[in-house]
Amino acid sequence: MAMFRSFVSQQSSSGPGPLAAPPEAVESQFSCPICLEVYHKPVSIASCGHTFCGECLQPCLQVASPLCPLCRVPFDPKKVERSSNVEKQLASYKAPCRGCTKKVSLVKMRSHISSCSKVQEQIANCPKFVPVVPTSQPIPSNIPNRSTFVCPFCGARNLDQQELVKHCMENHRNDPNKVVCPVCSAMPWGDPTYKSSNFLQHLLHRHKFSYDTFVDYSIDEEAALQAALALSLAEN
């Protein structure tokens, strides 16, 4: 749950009108869909109208053809604007802090929670999460590393897929060299000798999820390979 949702129990209800909205409506309207906390420096995408924290949306702006994190609609990075209307609403609403019960405007709630001694005490005393029932999913012992990769252009190491995209966009956008995709070469069907002529576009369009997330290791290796090959052909 979001920090805002965890420590803000109810909104001011001092009279009729917009400031008397129920707490649930406040949470839904003023929580960023990415970090799930109250908006911080909110920005809105012009094409779909969805709003996010400015910092939360930054990774999406690093790719060539960004998609809205919420509805997946393509958008123009140049048409992302500061949401002054949401900022005004954040300044208008107040809610009590769960720790000290002081009513704070939503625009200041993040900074207040980070400095509220009673909230910090609640966090410190929060019990650690322990699974009630141990998982029955077998843990494979010989999975190759498909979590981090080496940049095929300069050899930079320990980059996950998102970091690899950002690194290549910032440092190798105009590099004409054909390179082997490190993500593909780590796959069961990967060809470590095949070089992609447009590696950045290949990376952005082919690798939208982690392969290991969708593989059931309880089935045999051949069946897993066949399923992966079918997925690869479907993408093409």
Image (cartoon, grey):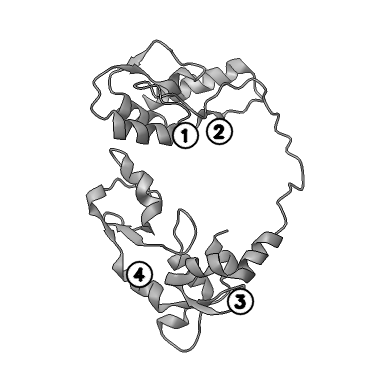
Which mark sits nearer the N-terminus, 2 or 3? 3
Q: Secondary structure at mark 2?
A: helix
Q: Determine which residue is flagged by label 3.
A: 100
**Dot 2 alpha-carbon crowd within 10 angstroms: few under 14, some 14 to 19, many 20 or more:** few
Q: Determine which residue is flagged by label 2.
A: 213
Assess whether mark 4 and mark 1 are in contact (beta carbons under 8 angstroms).
no
Assess whether mark 2 and mark 1 are in contact (beta carbons under 8 angstroms).
yes
Assess whether mark 4 and mark 3 are in contact (beta carbons under 8 angstroms).
no
Q: Secondary structure at mark 4?
A: helix
Q: How many marks?
A: 4
**Dot 4 alpha-carbon crowd within 10 angstroms: few under 14, some 14 to 19, many 20 or more:** some
Which mark sits nearer the N-terminus, 3 or 4? 4
Which mark sits nearer the N-terminus, 1 or 4? 4
Amino acid, disc 3: Cys
Q: Do we see residue 4 in this rendering?
A: yes
Q: Determine which residue is flagged by label 1.
A: 209
Q: Position of residue 138 (x, y in %)?
A: 71, 29
**What residue is rendered at 73% in x and 46% in y?**
131
Please indicate whether residue 150 sits to the left or right of residue 132 in the image. Answer: left
Q: Secondary structure at mark 1?
A: loop
**Dot 1 alpha-carbon crowd within 10 angstroms: few under 14, some 14 to 19, many 20 or more:** few
Q: Do we see residue 49 in this rendering?
A: no
The quarter of the picture where residue 88 lies is bottom left
Identity of the residue furthest to the right in this view: 133
Gap in angstroms between the C-alphas marked 3 and 4:
24 Å
**What residue is rendered at 69% in x and 28% in y?**
139
**What residue is rendered at 48% in x and 55% in y?**
35
Classify 123 as above or below 204. below
